[in-house]
């Protein structure tokens, strides 16, 4: 599904990713953990194609195709979805208007006919339930005046509407209380499937108690320094990230 | 260099036409016209040395000698039908190059206590009714173009709502320019009088028949007496080659409420002046505006709100969307006179620049001579939010879709407040169409 090899990327001329390798198979859930500044969000944004993230080496392939030459909307239409760490407020553009245009752009790309208003609303109502959102959220401006929890639920609602093949969740757990976290995790779990891969970018292990990953990777200094199963997350929770920096030095020799 | 067709062109044209203007020979009217003519001759057409015209060169207009349009030009009925606003039930007066066309108008079932008529007809038949109103909201001529309109004053709309009458449907004034061919000047003058306690909505629309180059010089005077509520929407949607100068001059009485929305969708050069006098206690005014300018369009809105009496409220919100090499000017002046204590006044002007070559000059101006007032103003000029664009693109919208959605959203809140909803929907559609046509919702 997603194959990243030797990825180097800079932000503001500062190297952040320094030779990152990651393989995500179909239907797998991978967690990327690491201390602040390790490059987790940079990785998410590079995959989504945000401006200002300069790739200086390596490759990112999605379903056998290079992603790096595609525009953000082409990536979205190919099936890449980014749940934002800080969802943007867009006054005057309703959730329903944005999603209808987005869903139909994706369908058109796949050669499918656009959904009419009735079918679209039917789908939207169904998917709202996954994240326990009321219908009125459809008609509110995108994220405007939403609480932190509502914003994150709205991201997962959009994920559920757009049905991506690869979903990257950037710190989706940050700022959530336990109830909101359970709702968000429930929505994500409902969208798990054999054709959909999920990459969870997170600082804390607690999200992984609710969305159990197949793989856990530790990112430090722009590289994956350790990979393992879900037990690795528990280990990190107990030991903190203190050991990671010394580990990173060793990894230079290994890599 | 070619000769500029300045005021003298129009002074000469007025002298040729004066004897044929409606009710010519009536003394008070002749005096009105000749006083305005003298002013036009004296001050000339405005140039950039005039502070109020600093950013609006009128050279595009003075390159050509526009000939005052003649009555009787033909405007196809199908055009009027095609220009109607879907689902808007209204009493409609249609004007062809500034002249009232009873045949194209629609005044069936007009309730008692309401007068809708052509100004020319009223001047001929009942001039004494017009005499006290004409020029009363305008006051002194603010510049040469308005003086030009006054010197030719002859036709236009008269809307009178008797005391206490609540009009059930909006009055629509449709001005079709360019019917008599290219290079025509139309000069309508409209008088709207809402007597005590009455309520009405007047929609003034300016459209062009063809892509003819024309000059519209349209002046509306509005008198809102005590406890009356009047809503006035002005929609300027003439051809991209047309020139439009015009003004809205309003007097608002005790506890009366005046609301207006000025929407400019197109035009090569558009200049609109608004003067709102809040004459008496607790008078209220809400002025909203939306201007779209693309290509090499130039749109200039000058608003002037004067609080004369205590406890007045004014709210002003103008928004502009500019692309290509378009230019816009907003000059919002608010004056609070010494007696106007407890005035509550807010003004906002927000501009969205879609291209690097577009330019806006925004000048808020507060003059406060009372000591116990609440006045705020603010002006912004900005671009589309790149973060929001990326967010929409990450959901699958392309650049153009994303920029269009954000631009529409920017324009939306001015229209959101508009009533009747049929007009609002129509304008939302017009704004959307305008965005579609603009090739460079570009970076």
Image: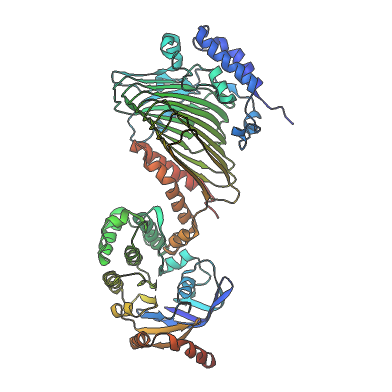
Q: Residue furthest front?
A: B371
Q: Residue furthest right?
A: B1
Give the side of residue A96 with respect to residue B40, left or right.
left
Q: How many marks?
A: 0
**The N terminus of chain B is located in which quarter?**
top right
In this rendered view, identify the residue nearer to me: B295 or B141.
B141
In this figure, which colouring scheme has been used for the structure?
rainbow
Relative height, residue B63 to residue A147 (above, below): above
Q: Position of residue B213 (x, y in %)?
A: 58, 31
Relative height, residue A170 to residue B422 (above, below): below
**The C terminus of chain B is located in which quarter?**
bottom right
Q: Position of residue A154 (x, y in %)?
A: 33, 63
Give the side of residue A111 with respect to residue B197, left or right.
right
Residue B262: tell me if it is visible: yes
In this rendered view, identify the residue nearer to me: B205 or B79.
B205
Relative height, residue B169 to residue A149 (above, below): above
Residue at 30% from the left image edge and 72% from the top image edge: A181
Image quarter for residue B421?
top left
Image quarter for residue A44?
bottom left
Residue at 44% from the left image edge and 89% from the top image edge: A243
In this rendered view, identify the residue nearer to me: B133 or A90.
B133
Q: Position of residue B293 (x, y in %)?
A: 53, 42
Q: Position of residue A209 (x, y in %)?
A: 29, 80
Residue B238: tell me if it is visible: no
Residue at 52% from the left image edge and 28% from the top image edge: B246
């Amino acid at each position: 599904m997603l194959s990243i090899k030797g990825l180097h990327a800079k932000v503001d001329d500062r190297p952040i990713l320094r030779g990152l390798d990651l393989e995500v198979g179909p239907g797998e859930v991978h967690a990327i953990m690491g201390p602040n500044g390790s490059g987790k969000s940079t990785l998410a944004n590079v995959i989504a194609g945000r401006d200002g993230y300069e790739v200086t080496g390596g490759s990112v392939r999605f379903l056998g195709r290079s992603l790096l030459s595609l525009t953000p909307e082409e990536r979205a239409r190919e099936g890449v979805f980014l749940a934002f760490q800080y969802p943007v407020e867009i006054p005057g553009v309703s959730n329903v208007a944005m999603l209808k245009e987005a869903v139909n752009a994706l369908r058109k790309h796949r050669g499918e006919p656009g959904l009419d208003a009735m079918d679209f609303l039917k789908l939207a109502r169904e998917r709202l339930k996954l994240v326990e959102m009321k219908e009125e959220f459809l008609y509110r401006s995108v994220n405007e005046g939403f609480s932190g929890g509502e914003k994150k639920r709205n991201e997962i609602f959009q994920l559920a509407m757009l049905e991506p093949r690869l979903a990257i969740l950037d710190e989706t757990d940050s700022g959530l209380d336990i109830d909101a976290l359970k709702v968000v995790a429930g929505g994500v779990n409902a969208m798990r499937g054999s054709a959909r891969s999920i990459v969870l970018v997170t600082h804390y292990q607690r999200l992984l108690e609710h969305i159990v990953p197949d793989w856990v990777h530790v990112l430090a200094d722009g590289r994956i320094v350790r990979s393992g199963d879900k037990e690795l997350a528990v280990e990190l929770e107990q030991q903190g990230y203190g050991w990671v920096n010394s580990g990173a030095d060793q990894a230079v020799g290994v890599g | 260099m070619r000769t500029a067709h300045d005021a003298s062109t129009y002074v000469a044209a007025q002298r040729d036409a004066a004897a044929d203007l409606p009710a010519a020979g009536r003394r008070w009217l002749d005096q009105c016209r000749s006083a305005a003519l003298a002013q036009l001759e004296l001050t000339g057409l405005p140039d950039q040395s005039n502070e109020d015209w600093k950013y609006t060169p009128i050279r595009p207009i003075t390159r050509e000698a526009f000939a005052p349009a003649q009555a009787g030009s033909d405007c196809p009925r199908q055009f009027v039908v095609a220009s109607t606003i879907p689902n808007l039930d209204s009493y409609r007066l249609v004007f062809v190059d500034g002249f009232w066309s009873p045949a194209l108008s629609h005044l069936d079932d007009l309730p008692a206590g309401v007068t809708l008529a052509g100004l020319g007809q009223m001047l001929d038949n009942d001039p004494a009714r017009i005499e006290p109103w004409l020029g009363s909201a305008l006051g002194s001529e603010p510049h040469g173009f308005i003086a030009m309109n006054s010197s030719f004053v002859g036709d236009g709309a008269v809307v009178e709502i008797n005391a206490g009458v609540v009009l059930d449907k909006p009055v629509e004034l449709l001005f079709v320019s360019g019917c008599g061919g290219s290079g025509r000047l139309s000069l309508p003058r409209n008088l709207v009088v809402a007597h005590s306690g009455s309520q009405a909505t007047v929609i003034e629309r300016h459209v062009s028949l063809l892509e003819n180059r024309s000059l519209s010089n349209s002046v509306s005077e509005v008198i809102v007496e005590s406890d009356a509520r009047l809503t006035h929407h002005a929609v300027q949607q003439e051809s991209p080659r047309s020139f439009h100068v015009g003004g809205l001059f309003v007097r608002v009485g005790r506890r009366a409420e005046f609301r207006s929305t000025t929407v400019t969708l197109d035009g090569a050069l558009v200049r609109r002046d608004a003067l709102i006098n809040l004459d008496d206690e607790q008078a209220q005014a809400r002025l909203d505006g939306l201007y779209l300018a693309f290509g090499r369009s130039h749109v200039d809105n000058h608003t002037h709100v004067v609080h004369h009496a205590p406890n007045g409220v004014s709210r002003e919100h103008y928004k502009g969307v500019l692309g290509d090499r378009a230019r816009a000017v907003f000059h919002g002046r608010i004056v609070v006179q010494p007696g106007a204590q407890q005035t509550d006044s807010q003004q906002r002007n927000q501009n969205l620049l879609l291209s690097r070559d577009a330019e806006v000059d925004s000048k808020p101006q507060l003059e406060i001579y009372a000591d116990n007032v609440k006045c705020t103003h603010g002006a912004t000029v900005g671009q589309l939010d790149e973060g929001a664009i990326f967010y929409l693109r990450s959901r699958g919208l392309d650049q153009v879709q994303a920029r269009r959605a954000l631009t529409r959203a920017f324009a939306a809140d001015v229209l959101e407040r508009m009533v009747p909803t049929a007009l609002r929907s129509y304008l939302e559609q017009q704004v959307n169409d305008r965005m579609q046509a603009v090739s460079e919702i570009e970076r």
